[in-house]
Image: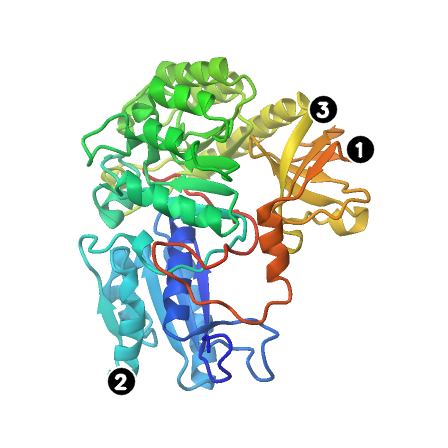
Amino acid sequence: MTAAATPTAKTYEVRTYGCQMNVHDSERLSGLLETAGYAKHTSDADEGAAIPDLVVFNTCAVRENADNKLYGNLGHVASLKAQHPGMQVAVGGCLAQKDRDTITKRAPWVDVVFGTHNIGSLPVLLERARVQEESQVEILESLEVFPSTLPTKRDSVFAAWVSISVGCNNTCTFCIVPALRGKEKDRRPGDVLAEVEALVADGVVEVTLLGQNVNAYGVELGDRFAFGKLLRACGEIEGLERVRFTSPHPKDFTDDVIAAMAETPNVMPQLHMPLQSGSDRVLKAMRRSYRKEKYLGILDRVRQAMPDAAITTDIIVGFPGETEEDFAETLDVVRQARFASAFTFQYSRRPGTPAADLPELPKEVVQERYMRLAAAVEETAWAENQRLEGRTVELLVSDHSAAGGRKDHETQRLTGRARDNRLVHFAPGGHDVRPGDLVEVTVTHAAPHHLVSDAEVVSYRRTRAGDAWEARQGRTEVRPAVSLGMPSLGVPAPLPVVDAPACAR
């Protein structure tokens, strides 16, 4: 009998903050817990089961208010724990790696604190805390087991993260991630491809290759062309419809990767490449080993090879010493680059980074620039989206319950992602469209952050991913997670939208 089918199984809830790497780690944590006999908590589970037996906070340390957000949430959970004897609380992720013993001093009701290098220890630490009746803090300084060898419970039945590396070798002055995630470690290509093949066999049709600096893949293996080779190898996997990757660093972006993207049909015409600043002076102060001209040159070559590629980015506003002239250069790059969207951030001082000792700009100056940047990004993104009006695009249909816009229920629209990753709301007409299926639609309207198609569906293809999603509906038994970093039958919902921080990329 599985954990979910056991009436007395303890329930868990994982709360995730931060980047895609944390989302992926949370899938591992869920898999570990279900293998250990826990069942995922649902608010409508059983009478009196409104409170989970275990709450795990998977934290981020990139943003300045990360600490306040965590301790505020821990304070709320403390009152719940006081009312429910036996309830446990665990804190992991980058903030746990950074703060270590501080967490249990400020929140002594926390049972377990674990770091980024030992997420596999969580079930043992929980049991130890329960038996010894005292908090357990275990932080390792280096990775012992690659996370993808751990059990998993993925969040999508048709789309999956596949980690190809962990850690980062860069030294950006604003970023604390390398200190918390460690030096880059690469998985062997055969292990990556074996995981992808197993996912496809279970109904997954889209994978996103994941790394802190994904296109530096191969450094540890001694092969500077390893990432392009990996993309091409993914193109040989039958049944794999779409391949994406995030996030590359401009300094490592080579022409062989552009060629691999353009020449491999299932690698999507989409690139998320952090800019951080358009000013060469600021980039130098950030220790970003590229300059404005190189960055724009990469985009030019990408668009020469893939004219319809959508480019997205990360930008920091208000880095110490940034002048109005520096900021104007960032606005100039935004317009030249024609970004389809951008994650924009106000600089956050992080203790322990080289930039932490630099004098910060006045808050009102940073806020005013941030608003101007957001307006410029929206204007550019809207213009880029309008170029697609009247065009036919292929969509991978998203989970109806998790990805619909606020008006979708009123308009009877569904939601999908185009090959370039743009969000499209469309009218399915009389088609019985399922999440994971593929449709072609004609764009009738463009907005800054999405596209709309109210025309008849041009074509509709049922997929094995749609079959897998349909097979899961009404399923009460949750199958146990398995090793190699993949579920027994795929996973739920589309790739989650997260607060992607401007970290070490």
User: How many other residues sit within 10 Å of disc 2, few (<14), some (14-19) or many (≥20)?
Assistant: few
Separation of marks 3 and 2 at Cα, in angstroms: 62 Å
Q: Quadrant of residue 298?
A: top left
Residue at image mark 1: 455
Q: Nearer the viewer, mark 3 or mark 1?
A: 1
Q: Earlier in the sequence, mark 3 or mark 1?
A: 3
Say what amino acid the circle numbered 1 marks. Ala
337 to 370, vertically: above or below: above
Q: Position of residue 303 (x, y in %)?
A: 49, 16
Please indicate, yes or no, whether residue 253 appears anywhere in the rendered image.
Answer: yes
Separation of marks 3 and 1 at Cα, in angstroms: 12 Å
Q: Quadrant of residue 357?
A: top left
Q: Earlier in the sequence, mark 2 or mark 1?
A: 2
Say what amino acid the circle numbered 2 marks. Val
Say what amino acid the circle numbered 3 marks. Glu
Q: Residue at x 70, y 23 (%)?
A: 391
Callout 3 secondary element: loop
| Residue 463 placement, left or right of 285 | right
The label number, if any, that marks residue 389 in the structure image: 3
In the image, 376 versus 147, the foreground residue is 147
30 to 278, vertically: above or below: below
Callout 2 secondary element: helix
The label number, if any, that marks residue 23 in the structure image: none
User: How many other residues sit within 10 Å of disc 1, few (<14), some (14-19) or many (≥20)?
Assistant: some
Separation of marks 2 and 1 at Cα, in angstroms: 62 Å
Q: Position of residue 109 (x, y in %)?
A: 34, 77
Residue at image mark 2: 131
